[in-house]
Image: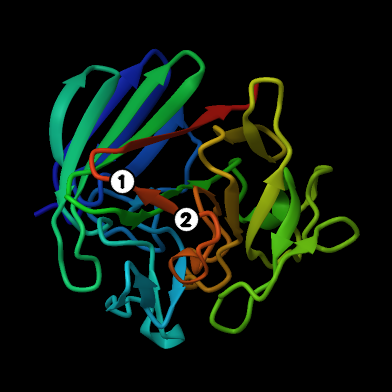
């Protein structure tokens, strides 16, 4: 049995991606045979959140407890060492292929009400390859009869072909970042300028320790926030549209030694960590309401 379930291969010219059933995740993405994401093998179980989609919240929720609609709700502590619920409820669930072509696939999942999240979501993931790269669209509808809290994110690890991120250069667009406590929960917000967390001008990741959320993102003329990771021989670019106002950047220092600092997780998110508790950036979906967010990856040319 393949740990990540059914594999769907997408091909467009020199571009090749593999999307998996478990978590609706992105397992591989290469261009001309060169990896743009630090993925995992077909014989491996996903680790470190690689390529997973995070619904109905991204990142950490302190104690897994929150209040909504007058109720106090408790989610499973899926990061028990830090007493957090982390990365939502769909990352280990089987998604279903609804439609596909040689270069694209649409997957679907209904998240039914459950303890800690008694709401219903109809979720769609759309992956598409084109000359410009890979585009990923997340479309979520409140399928229930009452408002529900919602956030989403994605968890690809980028690689610029270096053995570790120490040999790569990062440009990230965050003007501000969120300092965190020992649980990884934000304690406030701070200007990035003049700190070790300011990567608006490209600089080396050698010695940088990042597991931080950025906001107040600089955007280009098309409204896209863009992160670029470059190595001596090639580079990779991740972009997100205005639906994602936050970016988590993680240098992988807490991963098992065999994967530590091999890739850079860049996570476009609609809300910051702990949003179910703080309400910061939280989307409240009304019955029948749909939210769409889009991000993508491309080679630096």
Q: Which residue does the image show at 59% across and 50% down from the upper left? A: 247
Position in image of residue 99 (x %, y %): 15, 24
Give coordinates of residue 152: x percent, y percent: 40, 50
Which of the pair 9/72 is nearer the observer?
72
**64 over 101 or under it: above or below:** below
Q: Nearer the viewer, residue 189 or 72?
A: 72
- Circle 2 Cα neighbour tier, 10 Å, few/some/many (<14 / 14–19 / ≥20): some
Look at the image and tell me whether residue 32 can be seen.
no
**Local SS, label 2:** loop
- The quarter holding residue 276 reads bottom left
Question: In terms of depth relative to the viewer, which is nearer, 17 or 151?
Answer: 151
In the rendered view of the protein, which quadrant contains the C terminus? Answer: top right
Is 286 situated above or below 59? above
Q: Circle 1 — which element?
A: loop
Q: Position of residue 153 (x, y in %)?
A: 44, 49
Label 1 with label 2: CB-CB less than 8 Å: no
Of all residues, the one furthest to the right in this rendering is 194
Query: What's the residue at 51%, 17% (across, down)?
Result: 132
For the residues labelled 1 and 2, the Cα–Cα distance comes to: 13 Å
Residue bearing mark 1: 286
Q: Which residue corresponds to the image point at 67% horizontal and 38% vertical from the top-left?
A: 228
**Residue picked out by circle 2:** 282
Residue 59 coordinates in the image, percent (x, y) = 46, 63
User: Is residue 140 at least partly visible in the picture?
Assistant: yes
Quadrant of image for the N terminus: bottom left
């Amino acid at each position: 049995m393949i740990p990540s379930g059914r594999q769907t291969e997408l091909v467009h010219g020199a571009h090749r991606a593999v999307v998996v059933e478990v978590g609706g995740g992105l397992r591989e993405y290469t261009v001309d045979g060169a990896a743009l994401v630090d993925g995992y093998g077909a014989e491996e179980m996903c680790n470190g959140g690689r390529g997973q989609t995070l619904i109905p919240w991204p990142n950490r929720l302190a104690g897994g407890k929150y209040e909504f609609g007058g109720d106090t709700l408790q989610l499973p502590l899926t990061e028990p060492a830090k007493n957090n619920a982390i990365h939502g409820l769909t990352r280990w669930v089987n998604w279903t292929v609804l439609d596909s072509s040689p270069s694209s696939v649409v997957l679907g999942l209904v998240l039914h009400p459950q303890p800690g999240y008694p709401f219903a979501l109809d979720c769609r993931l759309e992956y598409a390859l084109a000359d410009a790269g890979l585009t990923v669209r997340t479309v979520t509808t409140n399928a229930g009869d009452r408002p529900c809290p919602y956030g989403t994110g994605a968890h690809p690890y980028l690689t610029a072909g270096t053995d570790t991120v120490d040999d790569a250069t990062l440009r990230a667009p965050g003007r501000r970042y969120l300092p965190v406590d020992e649980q990884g929960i934000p304690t406030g917000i701070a200007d990035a300028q003049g700190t070790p967390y300011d990567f608006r001008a490209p600089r080396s990741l050698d010695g940088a320790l990042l597991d931080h959320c950025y906001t107040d993102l600089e955007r280009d003329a098309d409204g896209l926030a863009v992160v670029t990771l470059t190595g001596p021989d090639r580079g990779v670019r991740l972009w997100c549209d205005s639906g994602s106002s936050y970016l988590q950047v993680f240098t992988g220092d807490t991963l098992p030694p065999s994967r530590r600092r091999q890739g850079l997780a860049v996570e476009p998110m609609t809300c910051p960590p702990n949003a179910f508790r703080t309400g910061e950036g939280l989307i409240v979906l009304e019955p029948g309401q749909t939210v769409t967010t889009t991000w993508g990856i491309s080679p630096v040319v």
